[in-house]
Image (tube, rainbow, N blue to C red):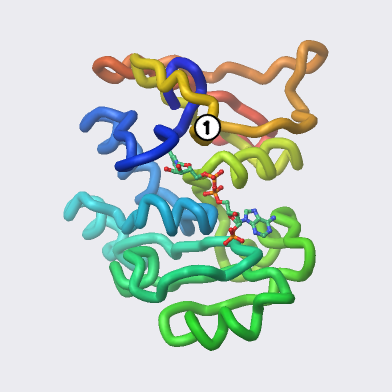
Amino acid sequence: MSIDGYLDRATGDRLLLSNEADLDRVDGVRAACDAIMVGARTVRQDNPRLLVRSPERREARVARGLHPSPVKVTVTAGARLDPCAHFFAAGDCAKLVYCASPALAGARERLGRVATVLDAGQPVDLRRVSEDLFARGVGRLMVEGGGTVHTQFLTNDLADELHLVVAPFFVGDSRASRFVGDGSFPWNPQRRATLAEVRQIGDVVLLRYALSDRFDG
Ligand SMILES: NC(=O)c1ccc[n+]([C@@H]2O[C@H](COP(=O)([O-])OP(=O)(O)OC[C@H]3O[C@@H](n4cnc5c(N)ncnc54)[C@H](OP(=O)(O)O)[C@@H]3O)[C@@H](O)[C@H]2O)c1
């Protein structure tokens, strides 16, 4: 996020917040996960590939009997997703779409050839989604945004660890997406989160918070 807590600019091209060294660190975290989740708006706006980039990390995963890249996961209520988006088209890893029940039929028609479309109920509860992912073999899920998804994972106390990277500039436009929205967070003035690590990575800083006793320092 920016110094003022934004994940992007309000309009125009995607805003690059991290530097190369931090993007490489993120690639390492991705490679150590079983699945990566982003919200459907991030799929539409950023069109991310969500693949492990480093050939060495991909090879190391294959040597461990894994697919070169983790499973990709998204969640949607309206299912307005393009089957040609990189989320679906890049990499031959599994792609899961957790879709709210009312949009399920249309989603299966549109996306059924490129992903596994799952009925996530109505409303979609990310705790149930997480439990379903665990039942599918996902022990370690990396949630890469955006703010709507972050907010639900954090307010529902579903995250074990938070990696917050602060880029050295401001966005200064409240129309842009913030790191989190409003909500009742388990960490507050009475219950402070545990700061596990502070690491300078060039001109950005990584703050790692331990949010549960499952935190794997
Ligand atoms: N800086 C970073 O590291 C970073 C990372 C990721 C994203 N971003 C930025 O974040 C922005 C997007 O964030 P955002 O908060 O607007 O959107 P988001 O979290 O990416 O996606 C929100 C969408 O996900 C679906 N969704 C989320 N929770 C749901 C639930 N419980 N039930 C059903 N559907 C649910 C809905 O999809 P439908 O609309 O399809 O129903 C909702 O509109 C973009 O500007 C992107 O560039 C930045």
Residue 140 in the image, given as x and y percentages of width and height: 54, 51
Residue 62 lies in quadrant: bottom left
Q: Residue at x 73, y 54 (%)?
A: 127
Residue 101, compared with residue 176, is above or below; it is below
How many neighbours does mark 1 have within 10 angstroms: few (below 14), some (14-19), or many (20 or more)?
Answer: few
Instruction: Looking at this view, name the residue that lies furthest to the top.
Output: 189
Q: Residue at x 78, y 67 (%)?
A: 122
Looking at the rendered image, the quarter that the N terminus falls into is top left
Q: Is residue 50 visible?
A: no
- How many circles with numbers are drawn on the protein? 1
Q: Residue at x 75, y 57 (%)?
A: 125
Residue 155 in the image, given as x and y percentages of width and height: 74, 37
Residue 27 lies in quadrant: top left
Q: Is residue 133 visible?
A: yes
Residue 82 in the image, given as x and y percentages of width and height: 42, 71
In the displayed structure, does residue 189 sit left or right of residue 32?
A: right
Residue 157, compared with residue 40, is above or below; it is above
Front-lying residue, 86 or 174 = 174
Residue 55 lies in quadrant: bottom left
Residue 26, compared with residue 49, is above or below; it is above
User: In the image, what residue type sits under mark 1?
Assistant: Arg
Q: Residue at x 76, y 70 (%)?
A: 121
- Of helix, strand and loop, which one carries label 1? loop
Residue 42 in the image, given as x and y percentages of width and height: 46, 51
In the displayed structure, does residue 164 sit left or right of residue 67?
A: right
Residue 67, compared with residue 119, is above or below; it is above
In the displayed structure, does residue 170 sit left or right of residue 63?
A: right
In the displayed structure, does residue 3 sit left or right of residue 76?
A: left
Front-lying residue, 116 or 9 = 9
Residue at image mark 1: 175
Instruction: Looking at this view, name the residue that lies furthest to the right.
Output: 190
